Amino acid sequence: MKKLFLSLAAVTLAVLGIGNVGAAEFAERHDELEKCQWTSPNGTLLYRKFTPELKPGEKYPLIIFLHGAGERGENNVTQVTGQDAFLNLIFGEEGAKYSAYLIAPQCPNGKKWCEVDWGKPDSHVTPEEPSYAMKLLHELLQDMKAKDQIDPNRIYVTGLSMGGYGTYDFIIRYPEEVAAAMPICGGADNEKLASTPELKNIPIWIFHGGADGVVKTQRSRNAFEALRKNGCDVQYTEFPGVGHNSWMPAYHTKGVADWLFSQSKNKK
């Protein structure tokens, strides 16, 4: 089903009842995400990993979270503590009902999940090769699928701002890996979204703030229309009056964790 959600009234964080959560909402739980690194001949990627309580023989979903530009670095910390509203997907009231792995890789300084110009107002062209960080992330995913108790039919990718761009890039490059995607305040190669047939198999929920002055809201509107043109299962939620930090209401949207964990490639 294809849906477009545009709230009639200006949505504010206060109205949503979430105040200033997001920067340190789950500070007491940060240590539950193990500090790890992936190293290959192509480089090194730092990441944090949450492992659920495992039962022998069972498989578990995996959430891949891609942070924004401000959380880049070499400390393996700020991608978790900088804006941790995404942890609502596993620690919040809804998310806690599910057992899932989560990884939060840290993009190195000076790199991007997708090496494109963020300032383009309408669209961009996907680079032929994945970025340094994206290539390493895909390698890490293959290693985890081989070694961890991950359900390959329930791998989800989400990200905000720079990570929103990365989310689109990931599903365009590796659509066979993904059961669902949630790009937030990002931008995409709209031509690829409209013409990649494998994207029809991926439920996608897009979020953006209507008053975003950093990544133009039109980028998400355009991505939504491109995916609709392709016949994809896509919905779009826009928060009027909300600026660039739309990830805060997005990750606290009622039903978002239930929606995410209900998706499986087995259903397709």
Image (spheres, grey):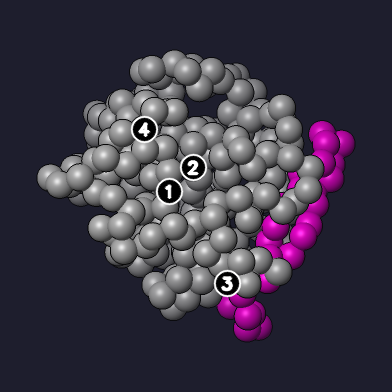
Q: Which residue is mark 3?
A: 59
- Is residue 58 visible from the viewing direction of this image? yes
Looking at the image, residue 2 lies above or below residue 35 = above
- Is residue 149 visible from the viewing direction of this image? no
Q: Which residue is mark 2?
A: 160
Furthest residue in direction bottom, as rendered: 55
Q: Is residue 116 covered in magenta?
A: no
| Tag in front: 4 or 1 | 4
Kindly report the distance in space between the C-alpha atoms of the residues bearing marks 2 and 3.
27 Å
- The image quarter in which residue 256 lies: bottom left
State if disc 1 and disc 2 touch (CB < 8 Å): yes
Which callout, 2 or 3, points at the residue further toward the start of the chain? 3
Circle 4 residues within 10 Å: few <14, some 14–19, many ≥20: some
Mark 2 residue type: Leu
Residue 212, numbered label: 4
| Tag in front: 2 or 3 | 2
Kindly report the distance in space between the C-alpha atoms of the residues bearing marks 4 and 2.
13 Å
Which callout, 3 or 4, points at the residue further toward the start of the chain? 3
Kindly report the distance in space between the C-alpha atoms of the residues bearing marks 3 and 4.
39 Å
Circle 3 residues within 10 Å: few <14, some 14–19, many ≥20: some
Furthest residue in direction left, as rendered: 8
Mark 3 residue type: Lys
Mark 1 residue type: Trp
Say which residue appears at 56% left-offset and 61% top-offset: 24
State if disc 3 and disc 2 touch (CB < 8 Å): no
Which callout, 1 or 3, points at the residue further toward the start of the chain? 3
Query: Along the line of sight, which residue is nearer the eye, 12 or 130?
Result: 12
Residue 247, numbered label: 1
Q: What range of the chain is rendered magenta? A: 32-61
Would residue 267 appear left or right of 71 to someone viewing this image?
Answer: left
